[in-house]
Amino acid sequence: MTGKPSFWSFGRMRRTTYALLSIPTLFVWIIIRAGMQGAVSSMNDYDVATLFFMTVIELIPIYFLLFIGVKRLHDCDHKGWWILIPFFICVIWFARPTQGTNRFGTDPRDGYADDEVAREEDYSFWGMIVISMIINVAMISNVLEMQKSQQQSEGQNTTQNYTPTQANISHQNTPVTNTQTATQTPDLATAKRLYNNAVINMNAVWNSLHPSTQEFLRAEQRAINSKRERDCTAYGNAQSTDKDLAMAYRYMCEVPQLNERAEHLKTQLNTAVTPPMPKNVGPAYGQNHQTKDELVLSQMMKIYNNPQLAPPVYLCQGDIYCNAFSALSQYWIYIPDDYRYQGEFNIKYQAQIGDGYGLNKGFTLSQEQSILLAERGDLAYYNSGGKSPEQEKIFAEGLAVLLYIEEMNGWL
């Protein structure tokens, strides 16, 4: 005579032990299930290894419930396969056990167990594990196939909406206004799909730009992206305290802005930024005997009157005037002439009242003179369309250069 049978699926389990083990396991499974759902909803793409690992983690408490359920069925003299019948799990909570020894072993309520008693071996538990794994692999394959089909469908829709060419640009995308976005409660999956489509479209337009145009617009594009993400994240959080709903609002906020920016970039598809001719080479340089200050002034005046001629920053090679004009021109070019020279945006006035973001720290206009601008340069800066301190510094430097031009010409 020996002790009770070991904790193995071939034996029996009393009803009290089954209840004490199954109830906490159910709570553990609910917690794991909630965590896995949250993790899956935050994933952009799925892969086999990740999905398999997550499903196995979720199945562990289910397997344990099957394990103890099989032993409880053995206590009622039934094979473990009965647990697969819907609602049969409720029966084993109340079914009366077999008194004394049955074909699956001795009664666990007895104070001893006879190992000499023949026991029927039931492999139903392991069979259910194998079946569940096969179903698990099939479900993962189905999810991955659905994801692949969705990506292909989105790619086809994007191709239909936008086909970049240098001669003919399609304008099929209609931006969604913020007013339209705010009037309906967005669905996270739908909002995310629209956002991904907008990003794909935006990237397609950007990749179709001439490399020189990309380089010229890169700093501006990064600033726009940063501002859009920051503003829309704040907008989403203000709309809802629910994480998923706030993310959906953020996506729907970004979609029209991405589409609008893509439409704007399409107007630049036929544009190539031409580097300026070097200032110190060519026959014209040898024929005119301008001083360095006169040459710099003439070059700056040319850009002052034609801001689209400003060179990209990467060609300036540290020339402060060149850098300032290059950064300034992306705003300066969009200001109407009557507003730029005669209206509210008067260079002399704005420079005199400006705060000079970087100028107060020792920016030098020439060896002889340093002009410090005072407190209200933000007015000129925000009129230009800029939003970040880095852009403000560059714009302030550009204003100072324009002020220098006016001073050199006796306009002050």
Image: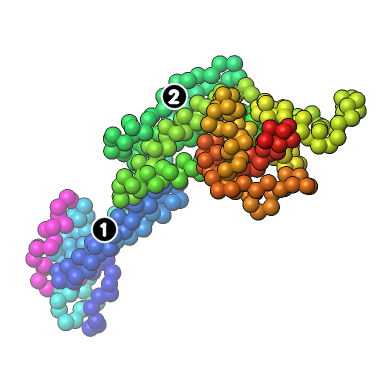
Which quadrant of the structure image shows residue 331?
top right
Which quadrant of the structure image shows residue 27?
bottom left
Q: Which residue lies under the disc numbered 1?
A: 30
Image position, residue 84 (x, y; %): 21, 52
Q: Identify the residue at image location x=55%, y=48%.
A: 375
Image position, residue 131 (x, y; %): 32, 50
Q: Is residue 140 visible?
A: no
Q: Which dot marks residue 256?
A: none
* Dot 2: element: loop
Q: Crowding near pointer 1: few (<14 within 10 Å), some, many (20+)? A: few
Image position, residue 96 (x, y; %): 8, 66
The N terminus sits in image quarter:
bottom left
Q: In this orientation, which residue lies closer to the viewer: 90 or 176?
A: 176
Q: Which dot marks residue 173?
A: 2
* Dot 1: element: helix
| Left or right: 125, with 170 as reference point | left
Name the kind of residue labelled 1 in the image.
Answer: Ile
The mark tally for this picture is 2
| Left or right: 237, with 311 as reference point | left
Q: Identify the residue at image location x=75%, y=41%.
A: 319
| Left or right: 370, with 60 as reference point | right
Q: Identify the residue at image location x=13%, y=57%.
A: 90
Label the magenta part by its dominant secondary structure: loop
Q: In this rendering, which labeled residue sits more in front, label 2 or label 1? A: 2
Relative to 56, is 46 above or below?
Answer: above
Image position, residue 391 (x, y; %): 58, 43
Q: Which residues are magenta?
A: 85-106
Name the kind of residue labelled 2 in the image.
Answer: Asn
Are the two marked residues, 2 and 1, in contact with CB atoms closer than 8 angstroms? no
Q: In this orientation, which residue lies closer to the viewer: 319 or 143?
A: 319
